[in-house]
Image (cartoon, rainbow, N blue to C red):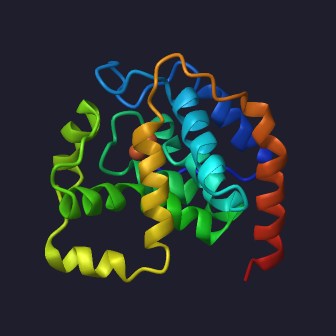
Amino acid sequence: MERVELRTIEELMAALHACRDAWDAPDRSGDPVDLHDHALQTAALLRRERPSDKELQVAGLVHDLGHWLHPGDDAGHADSAAHAVRGLLGERVARLVQLHVPAKRYLTAVEPGRALSAQSALTLDAQGGPMTAQEVAAFAADPLAEDAVALRQADDAGKVVGLDAGVMEDWRPVLELVARTAAAYAP
Ligand SMILES: [Fe+2]
Ligand SMILES: [Fe+2]
């Protein structure tokens, strides 16, 4: 599969706008909000939880772009989204995006009674199921583990039909800020 890179804020904003009426499951059997509203809700929840962590917020905004880039590729959607934004938004954002599926596998292992949306429960198997004890230990040792769990919790909560979480254009200056910082620290 050809992997896509989003090279400018313009391209990224166009992708985010195109998520309007795009769905995590192309046949609409999945989560009840479209990818556009899910992105806005996830980012808004993270802004409330972590007002100063712009990278975490934008990671929430872009975390499911893989569903739009490659419809139907549940197992690969976190990696393809991470790849798409790495050059523009930097390594930390890319890793947080990548970790949103492992974080689900982690949380279902450490909190077996945890409620998932029907779609999340369905795709968990394709994504490897709950982590083994060894995988849990490795995940917990990652310096980004706590942030990845925060993103995952917002992800799970950001699926409310009809909830107004603002407009996509409000995120443009935040994305520009994160991109500028990433460019300044690029190796
Ligand atoms: Fe996802
Ligand atoms: Fe999501």
**Residue 132 lies in what quarter of the image?**
bottom left
Vertical placement of 78 versus 146: above or below?
Answer: above
Rendered residue at 83%/58% (across/down): 177
Vertical placement of 35 versus 109: above or below?
Answer: above
Q: Please name whichever residue, 160 or 66, is drawn nearer the observer in this view of the structure.
A: 160
x and y percent of residue 51 in the render? Answer: 70, 55
**Residue 1 visible here:** no
Count the marks: how many? 0
Please indicate whether residue 23 sits to the left or right of residue 7 in the image.
left
Please indicate whether residue 13 sits to the left or right of residue 27 in the image.
right
Q: Please name whichever residue, 99 or 71, is drawn nearer the observer in this view of the structure.
A: 99
Q: Please name whichever residue, 73 or 2, is drawn nearer the observer in this view of the structure.
A: 73
**Residue 178 visible here:** yes
Rendered residue at 47%/19% (across/down): 161
Q: Please name whichever residue, 13 or 160, is drawn nearer the observer in this view of the structure.
A: 160
Rendered residue at 66%/49% (across/down): 47
x and y percent of residue 116 in the render? Answer: 27, 40
